[in-house]
Image (cartoon, coloured by chain):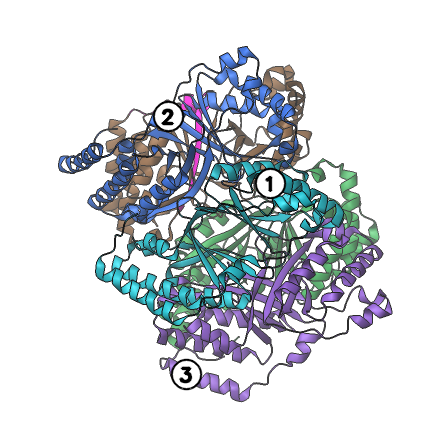
Chain colours: A green, B brown, C blue, D cyan, E purple
Amino acid sequence: MRHRWELPVAAMVLSVCWWFVGTSHAADREKLLSEPGVYGTFAAFRIETDWGKLDQATRIANLTSFRGVVEQHREKLAIDSYLLRGLSDHADFMLRVHGTELKDTQQFLVDLQNSAFGRYLTSVVLLSGLTKKPNYVPGFPEQLKADLKGPSESGPYVMVLPIRKDTEWWSLSQEKRAAMMQEHTEAALPYQKTVKRKLYHSTGLDDVDFITYFETAKPEEFHALILALNKVKEARHNRRMGNSTLVGTVRSLDQLIEVLAQ
Amino acid sequence: MRHRWELPVAAMVLSVCWWFVGTSHAADREKLLSEPGVYGTFAAFRIETDWGKLDQATRIANLTSFRGVVEQHREKLAIDSYLLRGLSDHADFMLRVHGTELKDTQQFLVDLQNSAFGRYLTSVVLLSGLTKKPNYVPGFPEQLKADLKGPSESGPYVMVLPIRKDTEWWSLSQEKRAAMMQEHTEAALPYQKTVKRKLYHSTGLDDVDFITYFETAKPEEFHALILALNKVKEARHNRRMGNSTLVGTVRSLDQLIEVLAQ
Amino acid sequence: MRHRWELPVAAMVLSVCWWFVGTSHAADREKLLSEPGVYGTFAAFRIETDWGKLDQATRIANLTSFRGVVEQHREKLAIDSYLLRGLSDHADFMLRVHGTELKDTQQFLVDLQNSAFGRYLTSVVLLSGLTKKPNYVPGFPEQLKADLKGPSESGPYVMVLPIRKDTEWWSLSQEKRAAMMQEHTEAALPYQKTVKRKLYHSTGLDDVDFITYFETAKPEEFHALILALNKVKEARHNRRMGNSTLVGTVRSLDQLIEVLAQ
Amino acid sequence: MRHRWELPVAAMVLSVCWWFVGTSHAADREKLLSEPGVYGTFAAFRIETDWGKLDQATRIANLTSFRGVVEQHREKLAIDSYLLRGLSDHADFMLRVHGTELKDTQQFLVDLQNSAFGRYLTSVVLLSGLTKKPNYVPGFPEQLKADLKGPSESGPYVMVLPIRKDTEWWSLSQEKRAAMMQEHTEAALPYQKTVKRKLYHSTGLDDVDFITYFETAKPEEFHALILALNKVKEARHNRRMGNSTLVGTVRSLDQLIEVLAQ
Amino acid sequence: MRHRWELPVAAMVLSVCWWFVGTSHAADREKLLSEPGVYGTFAAFRIETDWGKLDQATRIANLTSFRGVVEQHREKLAIDSYLLRGLSDHADFMLRVHGTELKDTQQFLVDLQNSAFGRYLTSVVLLSGLTKKPNYVPGFPEQLKADLKGPSESGPYVMVLPIRKDTEWWSLSQEKRAAMMQEHTEAALPYQKTVKRKLYHSTGLDDVDFITYFETAKPEEFHALILALNKVKEARHNRRMGNSTLVGTVRSLDQLIEVLAQ
């Protein structure tokens, strides 16, 4: 993806960036993305059709406000961006926000919606969950634990599947759930290398119990993984809601803004 | 959050406030929030996208009408305000209204929607319930009753979960329901201190049976509470509807208006 | 609620009223509201947000057309009006229309939507049912029959609950249904005085089987009535749809128009 | 309903009609409405609120395009029109189109939506089904077969109930289904004279299995018919979807256009 | 795609079109449409009502951008077009896109939505699946395998039925599923000649498990096929969602553009 902006505009945008880079301290992204006790929020937006009817200079000016808001909040938050348009039918783009306090995330999203760009956005999905230490892994066999430590390839494809458990699941004993989760984990193992996974616990924080996040370079491997997971006993306790799968591609903020500017 | 209004405007708004404080008698908020036999109404609104396209002076003038309507009705009603934007996807803010007569609440909400600000609002959730003396607590063991009297920390986070019971629940004997509610209460006890709860009975008054209201400073504690409640037998009689959880933060009317003015 | 219209406007509206009172013969309201074989239609409307942006003179002129259409059809129909705004989230007001021919009701609602005011209305709920002689009462014990004849207090609160029966209900024998309905009736009896009820049979005429209509001065009594009805066996055959309860207050046409004019 | 158009306009409309009557060959309506192997399409439309804000001359000009499109396609299709407004809450009018080729129906509906009037229409329901020889009647007793040949009264009321069968129904043997359909038919027989019925098979062609079409002068008879059908065993295999019943009145194209022109 | 923002837009667009016609190699359509391991995406769009209010010259100019985007991406993708309007109620047209990489499809759909025509489109359905080697056919009897190789007639009618399997299906053994699929295949065999079928596996890639695509010249044969398939045991594991069937006719891009230009 190459630079498509003319020089004066690009320069203006870059100078704004510079200003933010110069004054903010980036959150410890590595820690936010790997530690337990962090809130992850998935915010998917649809862009109003009016947006497409603005002239390009106005769109670029508005997108500058978008970039400004994101940069300003990077002090406390790790913010990832995704293009959903063309792979999902109910949203155009998604932000994944990691932070230690949900109110920081709220402030970021409020500032985004109050920005010049935000006037053209409708919030269509907003899910929050918590990263936690693995519930069941400590009781798994040592070999399985070791296998789970292998690296995973990332992007460019992203899939987010919100899952609600049925009421029976929660009434099962910890042992029964652990046994089922071991079977689940073993079924997923062959896809450990090609599909990167991250889990968020969201019971009470929204209308689902888990937000499952996936990245892969090979959607067919992700498809095979979900097929394999559908076949284990634990899957009978999953309820997925009607129109809930989000599919897209990982994009840097610059890349996302470039698509939205066109 | 810094003051972003210019001084003359802020002064104008303050003078309006003063006028209302000077002429209205506040409802007995403490009694409305603690006694049985009070109606609690949860009204969540989405703000039209046109709002964001108004100039700020017009927005502030309109918000003055919002403040005026709220102050005017504080004579009879206890009105709390919450910012949902950034934590819920289907509403921007919520009002919780306590009153002894539903028609006072209706008059307030009608006046709000007829105000200059109200022209930009869509009512997306409107749930009413009644506070009642505890149904099951009188039969609980003395120790449990005593434990329930401990204080709870409040805000800034708020969660509202409307719940409908299945038909089987209502056909159970009072004893069976009391036993299940005791188990429920014992499971909730560890979170008594960190999560504040309030219950509204709404069978017939809307499409749910209970409106459960929570405040906490630690969303992870609320998450753990709901997980614990999911595991007791009573939970099997709960039906939660698709997109019904409301999450936000407690905001004074001034704070809410400041966000909406930007 | 005080008169907020300026005198010349009020005079104009009153003179229009007078004209209609002078030229139309009112339907026999008493008969339409008490006899079997009458169609009752519940039409709830949402008012477009554009309406609130009209100047008041235009709103009043449009509301005059509303009043005119209602008065014109009172020759054949009994028309009651209700304010839902502030107590229901999906509609602003409701009309209940009783007539002996559904096509008269259709003509009224078509004329309403074709009127100057109707241009701002969206029809969000439209349910029709038939009043019938009681199905099960003739077989009830004499004492119960006598008790059912007591008077009921009316308004100002109105609740409309559409109900669909499950398929099993219809396959039960008449005796089994009669026994369950007797239990239902006995459970409702304590609320006979404080909650007024009216039943419409609507199988085939819309997507529900019954439209249950309630008026009360004490919503807490209505709440207790529905709780009591939830506990009888017949309730297990009820299916209520997601967002179907309508709650509001009885308003004369003049009172409703006054609210809408503001 | 009296003529409300002024003479020059009415004359213009009539002359357009004349032109079409003069140049097109009407489809063999009788055959299309009675033979098996014909496709029936039910298209219900909502008219945009902008329509009501046009001046009447523009509305009439646009409705002339509506009439033109209908007349033009009457060469191949039998087209019936219905007013739903005032009796259904999700559509304003409905067209029923019979033809031997679905692509002719598609061309008609495309031409309609591309017409000046079509710019104001939203297609809210579109169901297609096939008329077939009776599946079960050949095996019925002779007396029942004879009874089914009696005439039925038609309109002005029309009801369309789309029905989906459960998966169990389709796995039953032909004999079991035939026995249940005989019970169904016997239950319907008392309403043969007052309620006219027509059946369309639509499995695969849309999301339902059958489109059941009814006309009657007595909605209470139709109500009694559906109640009777709910009580037979076959009804346990019916699934009706949430908001699917369409109710209206039969109107000639001229009558429908007159209502829409006001 | 470089530098699109210069002012002589029309000239540039034409030159870009020319450039692509001159320099692109059409994707190997035959291979994309027949081989396993190819992604098929079904994108259905609704056209905004504003579109119909544009003058025809503007519509044609915008449609030129549509054609340009499609032609440009034919280098990597096989793109088929369908007219749904008049046969489906929730979309106006559909594109079926085959490619070896989902990101190429995303880029195409993003370019389409960013085009002048795309400003008037709402994406209402977006489903992606993967073509795979037959799962069960290798174990079928030789005669059945031979029969499956017969040719099928194509279009003009197209039907797309997304299907989700129930959780029980996935927990069955491979043998049990193979036996059921053999019964399914035998039931479908009589329609092999008149109904062309293609299967896409989409578990995880959207909210369904399979996208089933059909073409036929005889909708009544397709109806009979689906009826036959409903009767086999495998059908009991199918869940079809409310409003999911898409019906239309195959149209070349030129034919589709001609309809949209009117």
Left or right: residue A160 versus residue B259 is right
Q: Label 3 sits on what residue type?
A: Met
Which quadrant of the rendered structure holds the N terminus of chain C? top left
Pointer 1 residue: D189
Q: Are marks 1 and 2 in contact (CB under 8 Å)?
A: no
Name the secondary structure under disc 1.
helix
Task: Mark yes or no: residue C208 visible.
Answer: no
Could you tell me how far apart the alpha carbons at marks 3 and 2 are, in whole angstroms?
A: 75 Å
**Residue B37 magenta:** yes
* Residue at 53% across, 32% down: B212
> Dividing the picture into quarters, in which one does residue D86 lie?
top left
Pointer 3 residue: E12
> Dividing the picture into quarters, in which one does residue C10 lie?
top left
The vertical placement of E128 against B213, above or below, is below
Name the secondary structure under disc 2.
helix
Residue A26 spot, x, y in % from top left: 52, 57
